Structure formats: C-alpha cells, structure tokens
Image: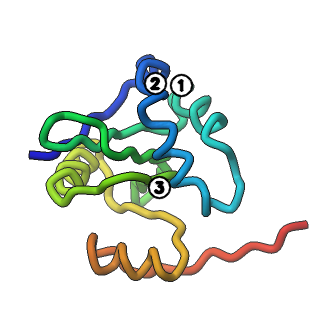
Amino acid sequence: MSSIQVVPEHFIHQVWDKVDKYIARGLQRSGGEYTAEQLKVYLTQGHNTLILILNDEDEIKGALTIQWANYPNDRIAYITSIGGATYEEAWDMFLDWLRTQGCTAIRGAAFESVARLWKKKYGFESRYIMVERRL
C-alpha cells in the first residue's frame, strides 16, 4: 500500500538528496519564482511543507510541497511543487491529512494540459487563470 509522510522542517536536510530531483522536476514549469535550493530554504524555515510519496516498500517515489494561505473563509494548501509518482492511495491520504490541518481547498498553478489531468485524476476544477506580465 502506498502512503505519504510529512517531513518536519528539522528533517529536510536528511531527506533532501532523495527528493531534490522530484522537487526540481516539479519546478521546471513554475515560472521561475524560485529554484529547488531556494524552496529547500523555505522548507527548513517552515514556510512550506514537504510531503513524501512512498510506494508499497516505503521507498520515496515522489514528493510535493505546499504553502498555506489563510483567508477569512478558507485555509488553502497551495501546491508549490509536485514531482514523481502520485499513487491514488497516497493522494487520498494526502487529502485526509489536509483535512486534519483545517484545509478547505487545494490550489496549484498549472498549464492547460496539467489542469486537464488534475481535473480528470483528482477532481480539480478551474477557478481562474493566473496570468502575468513581467516588468
């Protein structure tokens, strides 16, 4: 059975060499806001949270990071990076964990093809499209 493991900020350095490839892969289309090493700093400072995706043998097969955004009516888990395998059982465990943290919604920026995949596979709905003009 696949599973997830939330990594406390003081253990980021111990697992980083096992997850940095997944994090970097997830950031390839992030728009360049930060690199994997910069995200690592956010993780160690507690600004983001690292979740490992484990297979049946408890081997790390993927990773995702989230950043919390708290609004008056919602607590949003914003996916900042996701890479590697995402097993259905692990995804369900991730959703259950989010609920225990008071989460009311998950968000993530995605290109159209990823948005279609997330809609089909995980039940995401388009809320709005973020666009940007660099100065």
Task: Bin the neighbour count of mark 3 within 10 Å (Cα to Cα): few under 14, some 14-19, many 20 and up.
Answer: some
What amino acid does circle 3 point to? Tyr
Residue 102: horizontal and vertical position, in percent? 29, 47
Q: Secondary structure at mark 2?
A: helix
At 53% across and 52% down in the image, what residue appears?
A: 25
At 44% across and 77% down in the image, what residue appears?
A: 115
Residue 12: horizontal and vertical position, in percent? 46, 24
Residue 59 versus residue 26: which sits nearer the camera? 59
Q: CA distance from mark 2 to mark 1?
A: 6 Å
Task: Bin the neighbour count of mark 1 within 10 Å (Cα to Cα): few under 14, some 14-19, many 20 and up.
Answer: some
What amino acid does circle 2 point to? Ile
Please identify the quarter of the rendering in which residue 124 is found: bottom left
Report the side of 99 relative to 46 (left or right). Answer: left
Which sits earlier in the primary sequence, circle 1 or circle 3?
Answer: 1
Can you identify the residue that label 1 sits on?
Answer: 44
At 56% across and 47% down in the image, what residue appears?
A: 24
* Circle 3 or circle 2, nearest the eye: 2
* Circle 2 or circle 1, nearest the eye: 2
Q: CA distance from mark 1 to mark 3?
A: 17 Å
Q: CA distance from mark 3 to mark 2?
A: 19 Å
Can you identify the residue that label 2 sits on?
Answer: 12
